[in-house]
Image (spheres, rainbow, N blue to C red):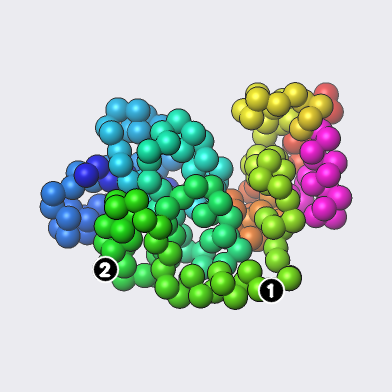
């Protein structure tokens, strides 16, 4: 079985790669630090299980997961994240992922998740699953639940400093459709695009809040030219 670990911290990648090599010697373990490297490995190495961090540097694992699965529908994704928020977990599983565990979990849980997912079954760490169940009973949900899947993808793209033309090209939409969606997103979140990065970072969907917030202002500038 070929397993790919995607995390933007080299120490994390090397640590878990060594762990899996020791505990699952019959598997081949690969690693990547970003979306581009992951695309190349998925195309060349017959990866069966992808262990994906949600919060990559300047990239959202939630968005990348859907792209990976569209190109490689047999791929099994396990989200591996420091975020234990049930709303993020819910959004992660909506991407089509097969599993979700926290980085604070024991090595045995990671191995269990891999073995369960390899059989085609879903795996959510028990404590997180309980939190998710409780969250679904709570009407006070976060931003992800307020948006449709497409609106959420556009929201993340804007938060990551992509122009409406880039977004339109990426999702096969017209620039007008993106603009219309942006109007709806602003109303639903009661926020302007220059605030999207800080909002997304606060909820754990993207990385560094200050850097992303300063960049997101350029979305408006680029979109209106």
Residue 163 location (% of width, % of height): 71, 31
Image quarter where the N terminus lies is: top left
Query: In the rendering, at what x and y percent does residue 116 appear?
Result: 31, 58
> Eyeballing the image, is 153 above or below 12?
above
How many residues crowd mark 1 within 10 Å: few (<14), some (14–19), many (20+)?
few
Q: Is residue 117 above or below residue 158?
A: below
- Residue drawn 33% across the image and 46% down it: 49
Residue 21 shows in the view:
yes
Give the camera-side residue of 193 and 106. Answer: 106
Q: In this figure, which residue is indicated by the disc labeled 2? A: 108
Q: Which residue is mark 1?
A: 138
Q: Say if the magenta span includes residue 181.
A: yes
Q: Earlier in the sequence, mark 1 or mark 2?
A: 2
Distance Cα–Cα, label 1 vs label 2: 31 Å
Q: Main secondary structure of the magenta part?
A: helix
Q: Residue at x 49, y 43 (%)?
A: 65
Magenta residues (range): 179-196
Q: Nearer the viewer, mark 1 or mark 2?
A: 1
Q: Residue at x 25, y 52 (%)?
A: 17
């Amino acid at each position: 079985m070929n397993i790919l670990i995607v995390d933007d911290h080299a120490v994390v990648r090397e640590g878990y790669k060594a762990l899996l090599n020791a505990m699952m010697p019959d598997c081949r373990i690969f690693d990547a630090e970003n979306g581009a490297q992951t695309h190349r490995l998925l195309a060349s190495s017959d990866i069966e299980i992808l262990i994906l961090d949600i919060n990559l540097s300047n990239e959202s694992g939630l968005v990348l997961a859907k792209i990976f699965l569209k190109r490689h529908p047999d791929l099994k994704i396990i989200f591996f994240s420091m975020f234990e928020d049930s709303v993020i977990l819910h959004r992660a599983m909506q991407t089509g992922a097969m599993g979700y565990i926290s980085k604070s979990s024991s090595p045995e849980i990671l191995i269990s998740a891999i073995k369960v997912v390899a059989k085609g079954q879903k795996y959510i760490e028990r404590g997180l699953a309980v939190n998710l169940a409780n969250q679904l009973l709570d009407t006070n949900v976060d931003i992800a639940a307020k948006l449709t899947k497409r609106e959420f993808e556009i929201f993340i793209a804007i938060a990551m400093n992509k122009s409406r033309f880039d977004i339109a090209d990426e999702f096969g939409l017209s620039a007008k459709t993106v603009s219309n969606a942006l109007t709806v997103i602003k109303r639903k979140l009661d926020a302007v695009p220059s605030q999207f990065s800080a909002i997304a970072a606060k909820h754990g969907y993207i990385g560094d809040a200050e850097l992303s917030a300063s960049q997101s202002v350029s979305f408006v500038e680029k979109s209106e030219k």
